[in-house]
Image (cartoon, rainbow, N blue to C red):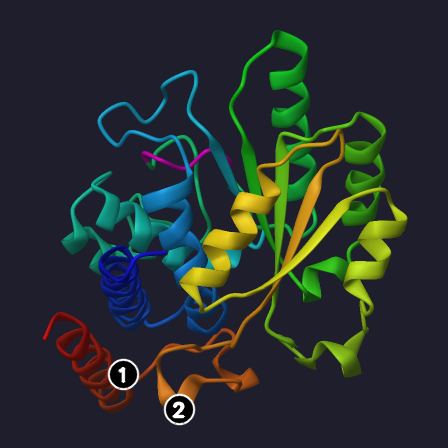
């Protein structure tokens, strides 16, 4: 990846993180940790990888994104706002009564949202349905689904994994956000899904891994994922929960806690400093 493109993606990802903090702070509730860990991934998908158009959110040939870990909606909303689906300032209305930016994605009211999600384990099944539909009707769009590593404890994930392999859904790419933490603690202590890569391989998937915060590695991995061979693809991305905000990084307490004013000011100060360094 050339340096100019990488810097622009880093700048956009930093702005996405600022939008996450802005939204959760103004809501006084929400899930910042897992939202911050997928900020780089969503930035790459919406600004480099996916065929989407904010001016025509429902265009038939668009690529689809299913945020199976729907509680990290602040990240999806923030990247959609940066892409131009709705004003960035609307992020401040997150979870407010009467606002369309609900605590979990709602496809009926929010432009750019392809699937309403929130009940963990179900999003990947919806993505399988979209991918199968494309196969049946001869459409060439791709379907991307983002799951959490704690979400892999849901049996429905593995039913979907079996389904996708059986129907040869090589137009489906699932990204597992492996930040190592879930609401109750470390995944290895709550209910370990490890080894994640071996399990998906056993289910008949093409398995890739990547550094979730390295755009060079992200680009290389998605280029490899584009080489279809009749198998669905899973990318296990190693990420840091709370990435970009020092006191949130790798801290389970920030799974579903909103920052107070002092913590908000510190987070925004850190992110503004990162943005200034990138733009300088």
Q: Can residue 244 be seen in this view?
A: yes
Q: Which of marks 2 and 1 precedes in the sequence?
A: 2
Label 1, secondary structure: give it: helix
Using the image, determine if residue 143 lies above or below residue 208: above
Residue found at the very far top of the displayed protein: 137
From the top left corner, tell me how far across and down residue 129 is, in percent.
Answer: 67, 26
Q: Name the residue under label 2.
A: 247
Residue at 46% in and 53% down: 219
Q: Mark 1 points at which residue?
A: 267
Residue 47 falls within the magenta-colored stretch = no
Q: Left or right: where does residue 133 sit relative to residue 28? A: right
Residue at 82% in and 68% down: 195
In the image, the segment drawn in magenta is 111-115
- Residue 57, picture quadrant: top left
**Contact (CB < 8 A) between labels 1 and 2?**
yes
Using the image, determine if residue 231 lies above or below residue 271: above
Q: Which of 67 and 90 is in front in this view?
A: 67
């Amino acid at each position: 990846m050339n340096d100019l493109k990488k810097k622009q993606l880093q700048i956009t990802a930093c702005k996405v993180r600022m939008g996450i903090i802005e939204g959760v702070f103004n809501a006084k509730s929400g899930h910042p940790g897992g939202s911050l860990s997928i900020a780089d991934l969503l930035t790459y998908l919406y600004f480099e990888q996916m065929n989407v158009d904010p001016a025509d959110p429902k265009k038939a040939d668009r690529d689809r994104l299913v945020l199976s870990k729907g509680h990290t909606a602040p990240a999806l909303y923030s990247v959609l706002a940066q892409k131009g689906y709705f004003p960035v300032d609307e992020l401040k209305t997150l979870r407010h009564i009467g606002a369309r930016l609900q605590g979990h994605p709602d496809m009926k009211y929010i432009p750019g949202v392809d699937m309403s999600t929130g009940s963990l384990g179900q999003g990947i099944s919806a993505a399988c349905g979209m991918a199968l539909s494309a196969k049946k009707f001869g459409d060439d769009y791709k379907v991307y689904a983002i799951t959490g590593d704690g979400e892999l404890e849901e049996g429905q994930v593995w039913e979907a994994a079996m389904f996708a392999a059986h129907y040869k859904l090589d137009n489906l790419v699932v990204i597992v956000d492996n930040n190592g933490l879930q609401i109750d603690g470390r995944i290895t202590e709550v209910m370990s899904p490890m080894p994640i890569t071996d399990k998906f391989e056993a289910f008949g998937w093409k398995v890739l891994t990547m550094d979730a915060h390295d755009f060079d590695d992200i680009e290389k991995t998605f280029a490899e994922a584009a080489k279809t061979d009749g198998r669905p693809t899973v990318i296990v991305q190693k990420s840091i929960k709370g990435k970009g905000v020092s006191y949130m990084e790798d801290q389970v307490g920030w799974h579903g806690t909103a920052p107070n004013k002092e913590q908000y000011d510190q987070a925004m100060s850190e992110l503004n400093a990162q943005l200034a360094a990138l733009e300088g």
